[in-house]
Image (cartoon, rainbow, N blue to C red):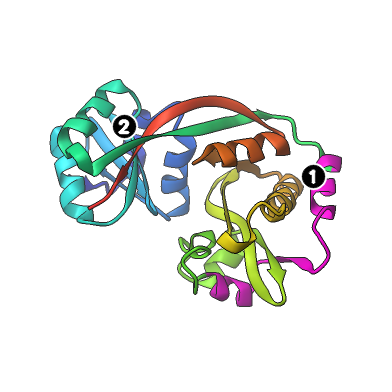
């Protein structure tokens, strides 16, 4: 497995459902693309943060190289079809835990600015909604539950240039947030997290509504891929349209 010096050569292997993810790796410089051949790749993997997508022909050798490279690091692995999924289960055995994720439509949507504003206005007294500026960027990195909001941007300057996000504060402490996990040329992928002690209070709803409105104002598409049914239901409430469910794998040590 080699790091592709020209990742665009692998783009045909990622056409379709996962094209935005590959575009993020290609456009933003936030991820890496590995393949079986530098000039004519047949099998490839795009890795961005703790999320990875496979493309092209199923390759046991590629999966073995991923395992060696990542060691015990947590990874969500997505194959494009049942052939890759069967190979993942064979290659990793009990290390690969299958679960269902939910894709929302990347083009069609039903965003209603009035509905989104109502979600923002429903924030209870005592909570404030703030954009992620320099201080909040660094504070998000401190705690494990909130670090993924900004972790893929190595500096605040990088986040200020390409990132976008909002946090809910309570008594000066960050209790929820929605931000661009990664970006691509015409959009972002939304990351939403809430402190375990403040869930089910509408905080994530307010954060996401504010982020979606900001994206619409900037002609960016706020892409959403749901990790759980709770995330799916929130996305549908905010105006997304369901696309399809798919199998992903959590790789643990």
In the image, residue 116 lies at what x, y percent?
79, 44
- In the rendered image of this protein, does residue 252 appear above or below residue 229? below
As for residue 118 lying within the magenta part, the answer is yes
Q: Residue furthest top?
A: 82
In the image, residue 82 lies at what x, y percent?
30, 22
Q: Nearer the viewer, residue 44 or 129?
A: 129
Residue, disc 1: 116
Q: Which mark is residue 55?
A: 2
Is residue 246 rendered to the left or right of residue 93?
Answer: right
Q: Secondary structure at mark 1?
A: helix
- How far is the residue under mark 2 from the one under mark 1? 36 Å
- Kindly tell me whether residue 38 is visible in this rendering: no
Say which quarter of the image contains residue 220: top right
Q: Nearer the viewer, residue 196 or 158?
A: 196
Is residue 229 rendered to the left or right of residue 52?
Answer: right
| First to last magenta residue range | 114-140
Q: Residue at x 45, y 68 (%)?
A: 154
Count neighbours of disc 2 (C-alpha within 10 A) and say few if under 14, some if 14 to 19, many if 20 or more: many
Say which quarter of the image contains residue 138: bottom right
Q: Secondary structure at mark 2?
A: strand
Q: Residue at x 80, y 53 (%)?
A: 120
Q: Residue at x 22, y 53 (%)?
A: 253
Q: Residue at x 58, y 71 (%)?
A: 137
Q: Which mark is residue 60?
A: none
In the image, residue 214 lies at what x, y percent?
73, 52
Quadrant of the image containing the N terminus? top left
- In the rendered image of this protein, does residue 253 appear above or below residue 169? above
Count neighbours of disc 1 (C-alpha within 10 A) and say few if under 14, some if 14 to 19, many if 20 or more: many
């Amino acid at each position: 497995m080699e790091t592709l010096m020209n990742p665009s050569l692998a783009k045909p292997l990622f056409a379709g459902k996962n094209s935005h993810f590959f575009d993020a790796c290609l456009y933003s410089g936030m991820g890496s693309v590995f393949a079986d051949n530098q000039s004519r790749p047949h099998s490839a993997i795009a890795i961005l943060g703790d999320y990875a997508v496979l493309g092209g022909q199923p390759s046991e050798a590629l999966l073995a190289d991923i395992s060696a490279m990542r060691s015990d690091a947590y990874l969500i692995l997505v194959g494009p079809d049942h052939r890759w999924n069967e190979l993942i289960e064979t290659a990793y055995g009990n290390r690969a835990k299958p679960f269902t994720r939910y894709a929302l439509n990347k083009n069609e949507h039903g965003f209603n600015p009035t509905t989104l504003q109502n979600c923002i206005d429903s924030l209870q007294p005592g909570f404030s909604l703030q954009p992620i500026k320099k201080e909040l960027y660094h504070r998000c990195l401190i705690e494990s539950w909130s670090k993924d909001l900004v972790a893929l941007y190595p500096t605040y300057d990088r986040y200020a240039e390409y990132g976008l996000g909002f946090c809910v504060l309570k008594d000066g402490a960050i209790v929820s947030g929605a931000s661009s996990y990664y970006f691509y040329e015409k959009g972002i992928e939304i990351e939403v997290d809430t402190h375990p002690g403040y869930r089910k209070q509408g905080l994530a709803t307010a954060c996401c509504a504010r982020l979606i409105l900001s994206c619409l104002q900037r002609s960016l598409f706020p892409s959403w891929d749901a990790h759980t049914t709770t995330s799916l239901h929130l996305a549908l409430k905010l105006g997304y349209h369901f696309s399809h469910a798919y199998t992903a794998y959590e790789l643990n040590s």
